[in-house]
Amino acid sequence: MPTAAQLDRLRIVLVSSRNPLNIGAAARAMSNFGFRHLRVVNPYQPAFREARSAVGASALLASAEQFKTVAEAVADCTLVVGTTAVRHRTLHQPLRRLEDGARLIRKRLGSNCVALLFGSEKFGLSNDDLSHCHWLMRVPTVDANISMNLGQAVAVCLYELIRDAKTKTPRQQEKLPLASAAEMERITTMLLDALHLSGFLELRRVADSDQRIRRLVRRLNLPARDAVIWLGMLRQIAWKMRAGATSASDSPPRR
Amino acid sequence: MPTAAQLDRLRIVLVSSRNPLNIGAAARAMSNFGFRHLRVVNPYQPAFREARSAVGASALLASAEQFKTVAEAVADCTLVVGTTAVRHRTLHQPLRRLEDGARLIRKRLGSNCVALLFGSEKFGLSNDDLSHCHWLMRVPTVDANISMNLGQAVAVCLYELIRDAKTKTPRQQEKLPLASAAEMERITTMLLDALHLSGFLELRRVADSDQRIRRLVRRLNLPARDAVIWLGMLRQIAWKMRAGATSASDSPPRR
């Protein structure tokens, strides 16, 4: 996880963006992940004005800096990285996957300013824009659809920059095939039925009892074969209570 | 990286989405990262119709399945995970950071279907929706702005699922403080000036010579102290050529 000082050293540079929603979305993702410096180069002016004046537009957007050229927008940075979807273009710089590139950017942010460039919605970064970059980075999309929405691309890149690789996952022991949600829901329904019949829920009246029971059942994390058994047991219990409440009947419930 | 079969086992479930742009954005991110199964629960109907009929709406959106309840939408899954921004709500299930949660989801996708739930733009998932979940997951946003745009949240979660932790980064040796982009651009400008004066560029005429030169300079990856020296050398050379072309002058260029 980058420190606040490191977050402050990244400049997100939107080049020739045309859609106010995307400019706003980029600002929102920056705010979500703790980045502050938004720069726009040669934006489509009505779009930029609209984004800035939108209801709920952030302080971040209000303080976005505007530049005429890429050169000016990246002048204080020692590393300039361009994002690209690599369509039909011959690239002149090294291309890194986001997972790789973000690691290098994080490292550089330790003591230097870094610019991360995003091109226009339609054409991406031009060759002239790219020539300002030390290397290029791509989000690992599938070949069938490599072109991401601008706001989503910004969000994904920034997330990769702040993600914490060291977060520990608690060990899980799950060997048996597990019951599906449908099976667990059948158990929940049957258990609720049984609890109602038994008067249990009526005695302990709470507003969200159905939800509490559903969570209780989900926490069982039952193997599929156990789920069948549980369902059978509950069905039998419910039948018994219902039979006792209405009239005596000796026919057992259908399995 | 998940296999195609694993990607096919994930169900993205949008619960009570209201904005057609967000439904479309979720579908686009799924398509970017190779996921195929979109399910919507109780969508705001005009929004869903609009999203489906939008220009460029994907096959993925056209084949989205619609359900009345969360229970039906997750019925074939053995793991149901809810996403939440955790605002003022007491949570009844374990909460995992995305980095953790995605690891568990990937593992489960190896042999089982998994549902990943996203709530409405305004309210997120309800307590009733959440009670269908085995555990919850949150994108690691900053406290000051935890609420993500729906389309961006989907993009970030799916990216984490497909990201490849094993991608190798080539080693870099960068000990000295590096020159800023402004300094490198000054060198580029000075070098271009010198090349023009020398006739170099006129002899080797190519359309994108400026860009080629800029990239050439960027690849130098100069330490800041070397940049000063380079700039001084080039300035001197340019001065000499210019002086020679116009008239003899013995005053050296300003340092």
Image (cartoon, coloured by chain):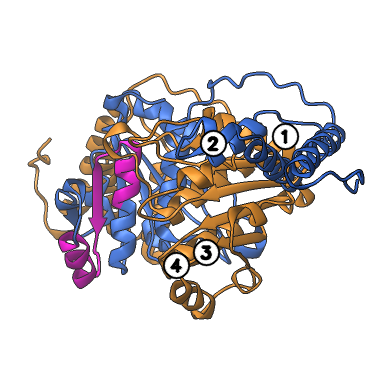
Chain colours: A orange, B blue
Q: How many marks?
A: 4
Q: Which chain is home to disc 1?
A: A
> On residue B202, which mark appears?
2
State which quarter of the image contains the C terminus of chain A: top left
Left or right: A175 with respect to A26?
left
Q: Which residues fall within the magenta stretch?
A: B27-54
- Up/down of A22 relative to A231, above or below: below
- Circle nearer the viewer, 3 or 2: 2
Q: Which residue is mark 1?
A: A107
Residue in the picture at 41% in, 59% down: B150
Reading the image, the residue beneath label 3 is: A42
Q: Can you tell which of label 3 and label 1 is closer to the viewer? A: 3
Taking depth in this image into account, of B51 and B141 the one nearest to the observer is B51
Q: Secondary structure at mark 3?
A: loop
**N-terminal label among 3 and 1:** 3
Q: Nearer the viewer, residue B69 or A134?
A: A134
**Residue at image location 47% in from the left, 51% down from the top:** A119
Residue at (53, 57) in percent of width and height:
A14
Q: Residue A206: which numbered mark, if any?
A: 4
Q: Identity of the amino acid at label 2?
A: Glu
Q: Is residue B164 above or below residue B196?
A: above
Alpha carbon distance from label 3 to label 4:
59 Å
Q: Are marks 3 and 1 on the same chain?
A: yes
Which of the 4 image quadrants contains residue B25?
bottom left
To the question of a shared chain for discs 3 and 4, the answer is: yes
Q: Nearer the viewer, mark 3 or mark 4?
A: 3
* Residue A205 image point, x, y percent: 43, 67
Pointer 4 with pointer 2, Cβ within 8 A: no
Q: Quadrant of the N terminus of chain A?
A: top right
Give x and y (percent) for residue A198: 31, 56
**Magenta stretch contains residue B71:** no
Q: Nearer the viewer, mark 2 or mark 1?
A: 2
